[in-house]
Amino acid sequence: MPTKTKPAAEPKPELSYSLDMYDSCNPPREHFDLTAEQYESLKAHLIAMKAPKSYQARANTATERANVINNLLGGDLSGIELARLETVRLMGERDGCGIDDPMSKFILHLIFHYGNDDAEGRGLTLEYVEGALEELRENMSEALSEAQFISSRYPKPEASNA
């Protein structure tokens, strides 16, 4: 009696992943094709980065990054100073990307004018800051009205019990 042989299983095609890197609101800057193994490794790394850290762990990380920058540039930046710079950089990235945040715009506006005025050998005047603050009040009022309108017009969908 002849023996039946199973046909050889077709090899599974290896999964591949495509990753586009963006800078703020601009078109993709870099494109990567990843194997399944590379994707899983990257995913695990990103999950670990997203995990909540204690204040001390965040401070240590900022200090480590500051030390790397100091070694490269010969500076004396502290972890706290680096965190402040990263906050200003984040506000700058969000500005002009459709994120209408009057408070961030106010802070960036003051920082910009502080730098300009300092470069020209003068400081910000109290009158200038008061004018900028009045503009912030108007912008905040406008932003709150817009948010209330959008909230009333487009109510949050109720969670379904599926």
Image (spheres, rainbow, N blue to C red):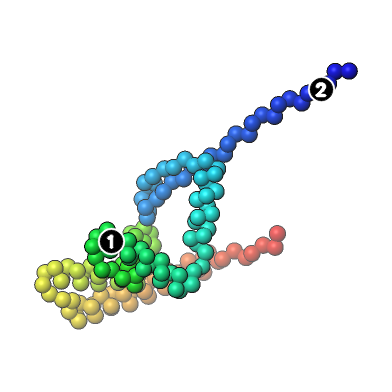
What's the residue at 49%, 69% (across, down)? 53
- Give the answer, above or below, for where 59 lies relative to 20: below
Pick the front one: 44 or 141 = 44
Left or right for 115, reference 42: left
Left or right for 113, reference 65: left
Examine the rendering and report whether any part of residue 123 can be seen.
Answer: yes
Residue at the far top: name it. 1
Pick the front one: 31 or 80 = 80
In whole angstroms, how far apart are the C-alphas of marks 2 and 1? Answer: 70 Å
Q: Tell me residue 10's x, y (percent).
A: 66, 29
Left or right for 108, reference 153: left
Q: Tell me residue 137's x, y (percent).
A: 33, 77
- Give the answer, above or below, for where 25 lies relative to 109: above
Name the secondary structure under disc 1.
helix
Q: Amino acid at mark 2?
A: Lys
What's the residue at 32%, 61% (across, down)? 68
Pick the front one: 77 or 10 = 77
Residue placed under numbered mark 2 in the picture: 4
Q: Amino acid at mark 1?
A: Asn
Q: Quadrant of residue 65?
A: bottom left
Mark 2 or 1: in front is 1
Q: Quadrant of the C terminus?
A: bottom right
Residue placed under numbered mark 1 in the picture: 71
What's the residue at 12%, 74% (across, down)? 122
Examine the rendering and report whether any part of residue 139 can be seen.
Answer: no
